[in-house]
Amino acid sequence: MRILFVHSIGKNKFGGGERWLITVAAGLKSIGHTVFVGAKSDSKLQRAATKIGLETVSLNIISDLSIYHAFRIATFLKRNRIDIVITRGRDLAVAGLAARMGGRQVVIVRHGLPLRSSIRKHSFLLNWLADGIITNTYTIKNLYEQKGWVRNDFTKVIYNGTPRVDSVTPYNYSERYPGKTIVLSVGRLAAQKGYFFLIDAIALLSKKYSNLMFVVLGDGKLHSKLVSYAQKKGVSHLIEFEGFVENVIPYLMGCDLFVLSSLYEGMSNAAMEAMACGKPVIITKVNGAEELIPDEGKGILIPPSDSSAIAQAVERLVNDSKLRGQMGEEARRYVLENFTVSSMVEQIEQYIEGMVKARARV
């Protein structure tokens, strides 16, 4: 098949959705498909795709409904005989219109997060311009179907996959933070990630523990506000905002435990990667969290927006090295058995091939 990904995320943004795209695109290419990645020129996404040998197309889409870019994409679809377009919700209007003009390619939308705004508009566009949704949790699928936003056979659940990390050298935190227990968080510095609650939890923990160091990997608009808030709470010396890191796996391998304080998620790639690295994880009980951690042996689920719960969970793991080891090993086993990249790519291939064949029969 010939596949075009359309993903016009901002030039400096690169998070879980972008990592998913790169992993899937590379996986599909490795099993013989022709893959193009449409992204903003000189964006982190385009550079990441180019770095691993994916062919990219510069698509500087300037609005959710750019007729000019719809024509440009339609021309590309015709010229390159594209069979299927995989896009994100924000680009659906442009990509869907392009497919209508370019030969009615199958259009699949990937939703890694539940709809939270402009729901009526997005629901209309999904039913008018898309042929299906790929999502990563049954929570999202059930929500869309129960609300009547899409028909019951419209959404396909395919869990995210994470690679094996056996040969990765752990990052040596001890050089920078000797004697410290490292608590790692990974994610964009955005309201969704709940970092203000994490900082409040650090303030609670600082009253009892002096040996903790919290490291946050990611960048975003809230950087200065989060730094200021940490200073206000008197814990700026206990939290390091490391910025964007292209390969987070060594950092995950080297930390002692992982915390995800998100207010909403689909299924967190970062938490899954931490589990694959054999780390005990604390994540908020939102959306697909219970599908990733079905029982407490594999991690700790806490309520969202609850700093006390974060602090209590961190304290529990810090005080029990045996529990940390057991939970990390069980988490690693579970993820490597149920959330592999090869399984994810295989399921996506089967799904989109079925959609293309169904379109050909119409």
Image (tube, rainbow, N blue to C red):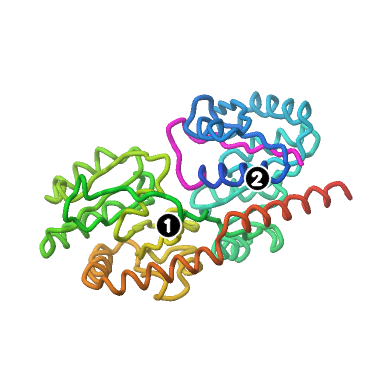
Q: Nearer the N terminus, badge 2 or badge 1?
A: 2
Q: Which residue is mark 1?
A: 264
Residue situated in front as seen by the camera: 169 or 347: 169
Q: CA distance from mark 2 to mark 1?
A: 23 Å
**Residue for point 45% across, 39% down:** 14
Specify few, some or many for label 1: CA neighbours under 10 Å numbering under 14, 14-19, or 20 or more.
many
**In the figure, residue 86 lies in which quadrant?**
top right
**Residue for point 27% across, 57% down:** 183
Residue situated in front as seen by the camera: 312 or 88: 312
206 lies left or right of 254: left
**In front: label 2 or label 1:** 1
| SS type, badge 1 | loop
Tag 2–tag 1 contact (CB < 8 Å)? no
Q: Give x and y (percent) for residue 282.
A: 34, 64
Residue 9 belongs to magenta span: yes
Q: Amino acid at mark 2?
A: Leu
Residue situated in front as seen by the camera: 259 or 228: 259
Q: Is residue 177 above or below residue 102?
A: below
Q: Amino acid at mark 1?
A: Tyr
Q: Give x and y (percent) for residue 138.
A: 57, 65
Q: Give x and y (percent) for residue 255.
A: 30, 55
Q: Quadrant of the N terminus?
A: top right
120 lies left or right of 295: right
**Residue for point 73% across, 42% down:** 32
Q: Which residue is mark 2?
A: 125
**In the figure, residue 305 lies in which quadrant?**
bottom left
What residue range appears in magenta? 1-17
Q: Is residue 10 above or below residue 68?
A: below
Q: Is residue 223 above or below residue 288?
A: above
